[in-house]
Amino acid sequence: MGFDLFVIPFTAGLAFLLVWFLYKTVEWLSHLNRVDRTMLRRGVISSKTVRSVKEVILESLLHRKIFRTNPLLGYMHMSLAFGWFLLIVAGNVEAMIFKPATIHPPYYPIFFRFFEPEAAGFPGAKAFEFIMDFLLVFILSGVALALFKRIRSRALGMKKTTRLLWYDRLALYSLWCIFPFRLLAESITSGIYQTGGIVTGSLGNILAGLIPLQSFEYPAWWAYSLALGLFFVALPFSRYMHIPTEVVLIFLRNYGIHTRNSYSSYSEIEVYSCSRCGICIDPCPMSEAAGIQNIQSVYMIRNIRYKTPDEEVNDNCLMCGRCNIACPVGIVTTDLRAIARNERHLSGNLHLTIPATSSPHHDVIYFAGCMGQLTPAVTQSMETILQQAGEDYLFLDKEESICCGRPLALAGRIAEAKQLMEINRDKILSSGARTLVTSCPICYKVFREDYHLPINVMHHTQYLHRLLMQGRIRLRSQNISLAYHDPCELGRGSGIYEEPRQILRLAGNLLPTASEKEKSICCGGSLGNTVLNQKKRHAITEYSLESLTINNPDTIVTSCPLCKKTFAQRSDRPVLDIAEVVKSAIFRDKDNIRIRENYQIPAEEFSS
Amino acid sequence: MHTRKHILVIGGGVAGMESAIHLCDMGYEVTLIEKQDQLGGHVLKWDFLFPDHRPAYEITNELCPAVEEKATIKLQTEVKNIVRQNGHFEVALSDGEKLTADALLVATGFDLFDAHKKEEYGYGIYDNVITAAELEERFQNKIPIRTAAGKKPARVGFVHCVGSRDEKVGNEYCSKVCCVTAVKQAMRVRESLPGCEVFCFYMDLRMFGRYFEDLYREAQEKWGVQFIRGRLSEAAEDIDQRIIVKLEDTLAGRPLRMAVDLLVLLTGFVPSEGTRRMATMLNLPLGNDRFIKPSDEHLRRNLTPVPGVFVTGASAGPRSISESISDARAAALEIAAWFNNSSQHAI
Ligand code: SF4
Ligand code: SF4
Ligand code: SF4
């Protein structure tokens, strides 16, 4: 076992990296809040850990998700990550077989060829030569692709690639150097000793004819070690920190930890896990339709990481969540953005002057929401349906519009929002209703996630679906073709995709669109963005309409009052809410009344 | 003897008729096509005109017979296709006829904004929300002003700028004539229903024409019409089918809720379907209001960049009747000047 001065850059770099990462991990874990720490403790000894290990292999090494979105890009990531991983493993195995019963310092397998230039004769020596060469070529192909991507990102199917910061440059360039240097160093040594696999051996022979190998050998190994050392030192400060951090992220996520409404350790881990792959750029409607290229999650996250907050970047986003779905690392970017927005300093107090009232007794509460107030055709349809189904309901905000509290929370007024929610909570619960139905997906999400109501909270798509399943209303299929738009907050936000589709299949002929379900494109009306001008909004609306009308439906259907209003302004065909479709397709006859009379309300599931 | 130049006027509203009459008087041969079964356009639907309350039929009574006498009129006819060939236009009409024209005058005008698109105002949902055009129709047909339930309204509201000056619907421009129309109609409602309160909800009042300000003053002083500055955010219906309007009174600086028995929407101008079609067919440039853009907004208001194609009336932006009439005469002169110039250059 040898030692040589040139191993120092590598060894020191590696030591630095390990210490740094260990320190970071301990810091992160110790800063987790109580709830998260409990989840972590419970999770470690469960099957979740096994699941995490599997995910680490599939995602951190094989990059399966990137493969799915873009095979060439996936190959690039996989060849670098998985190839390097295998190279290290194979190198260690080789060293162990060659000299069993010794504990090798970490640099030994890495520089094996230098220390054991004539290693041969141990079992599988030839095979190892071949495997090591093969892996090196595999990695080099990835490096070549990465180089190519920098020059021409479109070639890898991405319209935009990310801009670089200088730490990233340092890390990137040293990364690019590592494997070519390794190839060079190994080939030279092979050339001198007439060993090596097909690649290094033959390259060595060629080089022998061109340069005096002896005098180049030592510098080449130095260069290799320096490139490695530099990369390891630059890594924690560069985007490559995502490589180790993503592993931590995967475990914590599987334990059920996630970003809540303030910046936590987990948020920071998310931020560090962003590889700045830029996959979130292309699906963003802001870049695709509105030509705004600087606000995508990759940039927003980079600003958080380097503490260069930019309000404009934070604000100019639809919060549509399309990037969340696209992100191969599974970062919930919209949560990070919401927190970044709330960092803003708010001055002054708001005084709420909303009287607390109690409500008369009813079985069901219908809540239109402030956006629902702007689409009377929807609320009217809902009332007709509720009556038709014989429901004992209360239209809570019929007379006076009531705010669910979300706008206040979005504006960073968390305390005021809480106060408002308490008042609303009393209004709802005092009616004794067991179900709350709302027409607005935003209100739905807020009622479900922030109000902690001990009753069933349903969006009207779910409620209408339930009425149909229970036979309390029936539909007559219309001879009309429909295209369904998944509202951001209902689809990606709440995962409700099937109920509306099942309803619409009963009401007419449901046609596919170009971007269904989690790929649905924001209507452009999003309240999550207060700075986008109308022209750009219109561009996004038209972009979304284009996808919806690809099969030329008679009518566009959605289930969010805001989407409906937004589309209606730009659409060349009618835009209806699903409640309107149901209302006009409802089947009314004596039969229906009989069904209602015989109908018994089953024991409902309580949500908490 | 060389044949007379032939001009095809597309659209038989006031602008098209007035131009056709003057072109005929100048010795040109004119064919005027109109897609409806009657000449007159939007004016046919107005009962009386601002600012002097004269009956609208006086306009059509004068223009229609004059143009019918002088020009070739084709009703229920639209342009199917236009091909330019050696300085002529070969035009295929919807009735199968083909004709050759030396110049085209686009007088296809405007449509009223579709109030359904402003769903928050409840048009088409609540029975007591109507448009100004529907109110005018009631005036014209001497139908008394009543609510959907047949009761005398105790309070009527007029909403200005419906579909105009509204970024959200994509119409940022002012439609120009709806303010004064609201004032005119508000006065008439007060006149025919003494004791009924009348409110106008406006953003700001655009009394741009001669005598318009007098009309506005008279509405307040003589008829007690109340003007409230603020944009309506939404309208809802109560149990008695009254319309609850919500707005921010921007002069008083406080939110306002008010119940009215009848709500009248002053829907603005949008380029008519015909105007949009002609612009596409002839490749005419549009302003950002999507109306046709003339070559020069001051000096060549009827000329377009396409040689031989001219524009007049509300196809080139919101206009009042009197403005359309002056503009139509200007268009006739512009066409004559163009013929004179091009004959000098010997086509
Ligand atoms: S947020 Fe996700 S998709 Fe976007 S750059 Fe980061 S890792 Fe890639
Ligand atoms: S949430 Fe939507 S608008 Fe915002 S960055 Fe992601 S994809 Fe773009
Ligand atoms: S004329 Fe008056 S009502 Fe009409 S768009 Fe202009 S400001 Fe609005």
Image: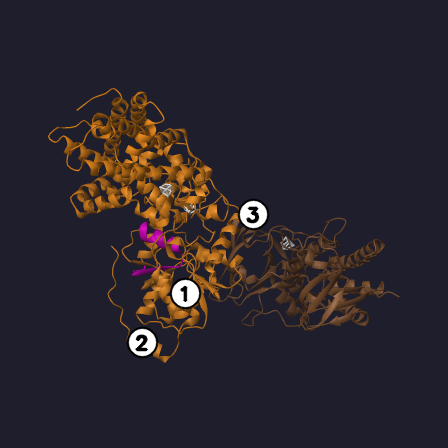
- Was residue A245 drawn as part of the magenta stretch in this picture? no
**Amino acid marked by disc 3:** Ala
- Residue at the disc numbered 2: A595
Give the mark, 2 or 1, whose residue is nearer the N terminus.
1
SS at circle 3: loop
Q: Mark 3 to mark 2: distance in Å?
A: 55 Å
Q: Which residue is mark 3?
A: B252
x 16%, y 33%: residue? A121
For the N terminus of chain A, the quadrant is top left
User: Colour in which chain A is shown?
Assistant: orange
Can you give x and y, in whole percent of width and height, for residue A414 in the image?
A: 37, 42
Q: How many marks?
A: 3
- Residue A352, visible in the rendered structure: no
Q: Is residue B185 above or below residue A87?
A: below
- Residue A434 falls within the magenta-colored stretch: yes
Q: Are marks 2 and 1 in contact (CB under 8 Å)?
A: no
Q: What chain is colored brown?
A: B
* Residues in magenta, as a range: A431-450
Instruction: Label 1: state its secondary structure.
Output: helix
State which chain disc 2 sits on. A
CA separation, marks 2 and 1?
A: 20 Å
Measured as percent of width and height from the top left, residue B299 is found at: 77, 49
Q: Nearer the viewer, residue A509 or B57?
A: A509
Please tell me which residue lies in front, B172 or B342.
B342
User: Residue A88's image quarter?
Assistant: top left
Q: Amino acid at mark 2?
A: Ile
Q: Which mark is residue A382?
A: 1
Q: Which amino acid lies under the numbered mark 1 shown in the image of this protein?
A: Met
Mark drawn on residue A241: none
Residue B320, percent from left and from top:
71, 58
